[in-house]
Amino acid sequence: MPDNPENMFDPIPIINYSYPLPEEKIAKFPLEKRDLSKLLVMRDSVITDGNFKQLSEFIPENSLLIFNNTKVIKARLVFNKLGGARIEIFCLNEESHGKGFAIWKCYVGNSKKWKNQELTIQHADHLPALKASRVSSEGDTHLVRLSWDDSSLMFSEILELYGKVPLPPYLNREPIADDTLRYQTIYAINDGSVAAPTAGLHFTDDVFDSLKKKNCTLDYITLHVGAGTFKPVSKENALEHSMHEEKIIIHRDTLHRLIQNLQNTVVSVGTTSMRSLESIYWFGYQLLTGNTDLLEQKGWFSIDQWEPYNTKGNISSADAIMAVYDYMKSRNLNEIEGYTRIMIVPGYAFRVVNALITNFHQPQSTLLLLVAAFTGNDWKKAYDFALNNNYRFLSYGDSCLFFPAKGE
C-alpha cells in the first residue's frame, strides 16, 4: 500500500492552511464558566454568532452526539538532578507495567543533561519516592522506567502525586490548581490522554439537559489524545507529514446507537471523536474486504494514515458499522481496541459525521486540515470572522459548530 496518496491528490501546500494568530487571541486561561464561551455556527456558508449555552438551538432534533470520554493524566514529571539541572519527562504511551513500576515512551526535556544516572523525586509528605531510569532512546523519544517502593499504588496514582497537568506548549505557562479541573471535560472517565479533547470543555449539565429536551442522544467513545496533536505540519506539502498514532476504544452499544441514528444528524464533539468515528468506518471496510490479518494476529485493529485514500469500491456507512457490530457480537465482545493514524485532509469523503463541534486550531496543523476537509474553504471565512469579532483561540478558547460544505 502506498505511503501517501500522492498519486491520487495534487500536493496540499500547508501554507494555504495558515492564518495570522496574534498572541493576544490565544486564550491563556479558561472562562469562569464553561458554557459562557462564544459559539460560531456555520451552515451553508452563513455564519451565526452565538453563545455555547445556545448550542441546542442549532442542533437538529433527534441528533446523536458522540463525545470522547478520555481523561487527561498528569503526564509531566519534573526531576532535578543533584547538580541542579532540570529534567522534564513527558509521558506519552505506556509500553509495559508491573507492581511498583511502569515503562513509558516519553519525551525528555534537557535530555543531554541526563546521562545514565537514576533520577528521583521525593514527596514532601514522606510518600514513596518516584525514580526514573532511561532504558533506551529512539529519535526524539525515550523509553523510561519509572518505579516506586509501594507496590499497592498504581501508576495513575503516582502521576496524581507527582505529575503536572500537561498544558499545551503554546499556552507558555506553568499549570495552576484550577487547570486540574478545567483542562478536563466533566464526563472524562478513562485515563490515558496527554491533551484534552478541547471541544468538550464547554459542556455543562445545563447544556446536556437542553440537548436532551430536543430528543438528542448522547454517547461516548474513547480516543486517548497523544502529544502529536500539537505537532505542526513542517513539510511544505502536507501529504509528506507523518501522522501520529492514537488508541481508540469502541463499545458495542455505541455502534448499535450509531446504526439506529445514521438517518439522523451525527454530531462529532471534537476532532478526536471525528477521527474515531471515521476510523470505525474503515475498520468495518477492512472486515468486509477481508483485510483482517493484523486483527487476527493481535486482537486489535489498525487504520493507517493513508488507508482511506487507497481503497477501492464503495461500502455504505450502515454496512461498515454493522460489520464491526456483528464482529463484536459474534465474539461476545462488549468493547474492542484499535489504533488509528488516519489523516483527514481536503479531499477526504466523510462517511459517518454530519456536524462537527470544535475549537479554533493552530495554523498549519493537522486539526485545521481536518476542519478544512469538512467545511471546504468556508474555514477561512469562519476564522476571519472569529479574529475580527473577539473570539478566543485554541484549547481554552471559544467554540464552533460546523456543518459540511455544500456538495460535501
Image (cartoon, rainbow, N blue to C red):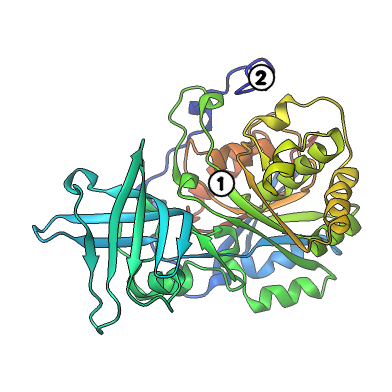
Could you tell me which residue is drawn at 58 percent across and 18 percent down? 11
- Asked if residue 137 lies left or right of residue 244, the reply is left
Q: CA distance from mark 1 to mark 2?
A: 30 Å
First in sequence: mark 1 vs mark 2? 2
Q: At x 75% / y 65%, what residue is drawn? A: 219
Is residue 48 among the parts visible in the rendering? no
Q: Which residue is mark 1?
A: 385
Residue displayed at 86% across by 38% down:
288
Give percent across and percent down for residue 22.
38, 45
Label 2: how many residues lie within 10 Å, few (<14), some (14-19) or many (20+)?
A: few
Residues 166 and 131: in front is: 131
Q: Position of residue 139 (x, y in %)?
A: 36, 35
Residue 177 vertical placement versus 250 (above, below): below
What amino acid does circle 2 point to? Answer: Phe
Q: Residue 204: x, y in percent?
A: 62, 75
Helix, strand or loop for disc 2: loop
Left or right for 283, reference 21: right
Residue 339 falls left or right of residue 288: left
Q: State the residue position of label 2.
A: 9
Amino acid at pointer 1:
Phe
